[in-house]
Amino acid sequence: MNSDTRGLDLVPATAADYRELARRRLPRHLFDYMDGAAYDEVTAGENLRGFQRLTLRQRVLRDVSSLKLSTRVLGQELAMPVVLAPIGIAGAFARRAEVQAARAAEAAGIPFCESTVSICSIEEVRAATKAPFWYQLYVMRDRGFARELMQRAQAAACPVLVLTVDLAVMGARYRDIRNGMAGRLGPGGKLRKAWDLLSHPGWLLDVGIHGKPLTFGNLTRAVPDARSLPEFKAWVDSQFDPAVTWKDIAWVRENWPGKVVLKGVLDVEDARQAADVGADGIVISNHGGRQLDGVESAIAALPRIADAVGDRIELLMDGGVRSGLDVVKALALGARACMIGRAWGYAVAARGEAGVAHVLATMRKEMEVALALTGVTDVGALDSNALLG
Ligand SMILES: Cc1cc2nc3c(=O)[nH]c(=O)nc-3n(C[C@H](O)[C@H](O)[C@H](O)COP(=O)(O)O)c2cc1C
């Protein structure tokens, strides 16, 4: 990723710059939680390298004076083909981070997707914004509770339910284990963590003082204190249901009148099945490399899936999208839009709403340049002709 840390005291220019700023601002366990991935983090790296290996095809003299970035995704008009991916516990990165991100998304004319395990509740995000936002759900063992969450999202007029299906079990994230995120810390670990928190006064003031209450806004009954990570983990272990199958999608459909998108599909057969069960869309995703390390990058899986079901179901993808050039490459391979995860996470941690707005504005400009210099004037017209090979 392109980052020049010498210039960072002045102006961050790229998502990679925001990553560096986030690294400086956050206590280590939080930066590692966001930046890290499962096992050896090979798939997370592949997500980035997959984009780098793709070559755009430069074209000239094609009147690119007027460019159209807006597009229709799941029945909604977006100002550009980007959606903020669900990020759990984002409110620990910056004060009321989900609200800040939702506001930046609203201003940019794109949807924010609220994670089930957010700090800000569905209702708090609703009250702070006017634009429709999406809601992400895991199918939990307690179906009554899952239904209740869907009803809350419906009451908030969320048009799209993003059902995350790649978390039947949790992949181990070794950085989290080393930092004590996955279990209780001993006395030495507690001391080191307290010192780490105190060494980040900007974050401490923003989140520790002004960011309260630090509760899981959607789960206040189930997990009363978001700072109690073992309590949260126990809830995840008891509620995330490994027995979920394709049949359960029908149950979700019965309880959700809006659009349903399955997030975490990486295989052609699964994509076909998603279309067969009547999902409106899928997010081709390996959860940002945070689940099964060793699987292929989402951008590598995209063309096969687009070939198989691109005419039956809307395709979104995520994983490694850090720039507008990446978005253009993904659209050229058949995606309707991209979700971005860490790119907004780093930005909100570093500079709050303004940071997310800046990353989105930068992506927009990058997309415009990539369109103009591949000779394509409408994102909807992008296809494999925009790439070489
Ligand atoms: C810190 C963090 C928390 C995440 N939490 C969730 C979540 O609660 N639900 C979900 O479906 N995906 C979650 N994801 C996955 C993202 O939605 C998305 O798939 C991934 O970040 C895309 O990769 P990228 O970060 O390279 O853009 C999370 C990702 C990160 C980095």
Image (cartoon, helix red, strand yellow):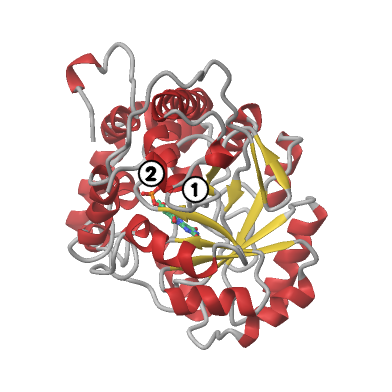
Secondary structure category for the residue under label 2: loop
Number of numbered markers: 2
Report the front residue among 239 and 347. Answer: 347
Q: Count residues near mark 1 (Cα–Cα under 10 Å), then give few for <14, some for 14-19, many for 20+.
A: many
Secondary structure category for the residue under label 1: strand
Q: Is residue 77 left or right of residue 67?
A: right
Residue 359: name its quadrant: top left
List the residue tagged with mark 2: 321
In the image, the residue with mark 2 has its CB under 8 Å from the nearest atom of ligand 1: yes
Q: Look at 47% across and 35% down and name the residue there.
A: 94
List the residue tagged with mark 1: 339
Q: Amino acid at mark 1?
A: Met
Q: Amino acid at mark 2?
A: Val
Residue 287 image position (x, y, % from top left): 40, 61
Residue 340 appears anywhere in the view: no
Residue 229 image position (x, y, % from top left): 41, 61
Q: Quadrant of ligand 1?
A: bottom left
Residue 162 appears anywhere in the view: yes
Which mark is first along the chain, 2 or 1? 2
Residue 72 image position (x, y, % from top left): 67, 44
Q: Count residues near mark 2 (Cα–Cα under 10 Å), then give few for <14, some for 14-19, many for 20+.
A: many
Do labels 1 and 2 touch, CB within 8 Å? yes
Q: Look at 62% across and 67% down and name the residue there.
A: 312
In three-dimensional space, the C-alpha distance between marks 1 and 2, rounded to whole angstroms, equals 8 Å
Q: Is residue 202 above or below residue 94?
A: above
Q: Is residue 367 above or below residue 144?
A: above
Q: Is residue 289 left or right of residue 365?
A: left
